[in-house]
Amino acid sequence: MKMILRWFPFGDDSVTLKEIRQIPGVTGVATCMPKIPVGEVWPLEMLESLKKEINDAGLEMEVIESVNIHEDIKKGLPSRDRYIENYIRTLEHLSKVGVKVLCYNFMPVMDWARSDLSLELPDGSQVMAYRHEEVLKMNPKVMADVMAKKARGYSLPGWEPERLDAMAKDIEFYQNMTQETYWENMKYFLDTVIPYAEQYDIKLAIHPDDPPWPLYGLPKVITNRENIRKFLDLNKSPYNGLTFCTGSLGSDLKNDLPEMIREFGKEGRIHFAHIRNVKHLTEKDFDESAHLSSCGDLDMFEVMKAYDEVGFEGYVRPDHGRMIWGEKARPGYGLYDRAIGANYLLGLQEAISKMKTRYK
Ligand code: DNO
Ligand code: MN
């Protein structure tokens, strides 16, 4: 497996490429183009200069996380064809700069949800946290109504009424759509794009929904073994694969992660592994924790052993870390805890593979 770290370009990250290069065993980054509006083509020249910057720092740019999917594609609107065409052109450009894996998600309206981006634990570290009841109260539909009544022209930054209104309208749209239609829209996207992914030799790797259960009546599809099987069967090309995120899928304790890694990994459908741990307070309330097995509910030894068993040769990154040692960084994406995580995972991997070959 190739160990990489997520890195945000164009001065958007407090962590530098030079620092990433100094983490033992890390050979590249997963990066993105945050300035390009969703649905537009990523310009080749920008990708070329980004690749040069990353390569000059001694790192590889073989993974992109993410090229986001325009909402019209998820909604199945007639305008989706134009956005899918743009997606394909972006794929073509990515192939020209040697990208091998593209991570994306197919979550409606919003990416992952948390109630707290910086919850302080007794040891002084800060983590992202999820409290189900609080997240339910953040429902943009409800918030939009409350703001309309109370705002009188003022609003908190990021909670502007227009923004909430638009989100509320989107949510309503999906509430009137059956889950089956959502799956069909997904299939339409995959069947159009995957032949190009094959041609350009870029593996598509969908990220699971986070949390892996329904919120605000929105469809959630990449949540468990059964649904992932259904997703992989929508288009059976090996280029239609997974970003297997232990933190997202592990938020539902019913998911047997090592078993799922063995099943999908054996079939060559996992292209990118996100590894992080979660600690549950109740069935649906959890804190993101340090990577170590003893710090959370997930058994990282079993996770790494499952990857070893299936001969996983894809990319792996330590997912969200805690904020420690006074670091000020993007929540989940500080340097220190992710560096510790990467080396813990590499340590497990070394032990597992040497036990196998040296002490049969
Ligand atoms: C959380 C992260 C995600 C991921 C996006 C990919 O587990 O890995 O935010 O980056 O969902 O599109
Ligand atoms: Mn993840």
Image: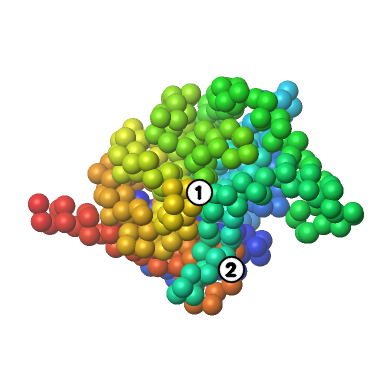
**How far is mark 2 from mark 1, CA to CA?**
22 Å
Residue at screen point 47% across, 58% down: 288
Q: Is residue 306 visible?
A: yes
Q: Dot 1 corresponds to which residue? A: 63
Splitting the image into 4 quarters, where does residue 27 fall?
Answer: bottom left
- The image shows residue 177 at horizontal and vertical percentages of 65, 25
Residue at screen point 37% across, 58% down: 296
Residue at screen point 58% across, 68% down: 329
Closer to us: 186 or 177: 177
Decide: few, some or many residues near mark 1? Use Cα within 10 Å; few <14, some 14-19, many ≥20.
many
Q: Badges 2 and 1: C-beta atoms under 8 Å apart? A: no
Q: Is residue 152 above or below residue 256?
A: below
The answer to which of marks 2 and 1 sits earlier in the sequence is 1
Splitting the image into 4 quarters, where does residue 92 fall?
Answer: top right
- The image shows residue 306 at horizontal and vertical percentages of 28, 45
Q: Point out the residue furthest to the right here.
A: 153
Q: Point out the residue furthest to the left here.
A: 360
Disc number placed over residue 329 in the picture, else none? 2
Closer to us: 174 or 275: 174
What amino acid type is highlighted by mark number 1? Val
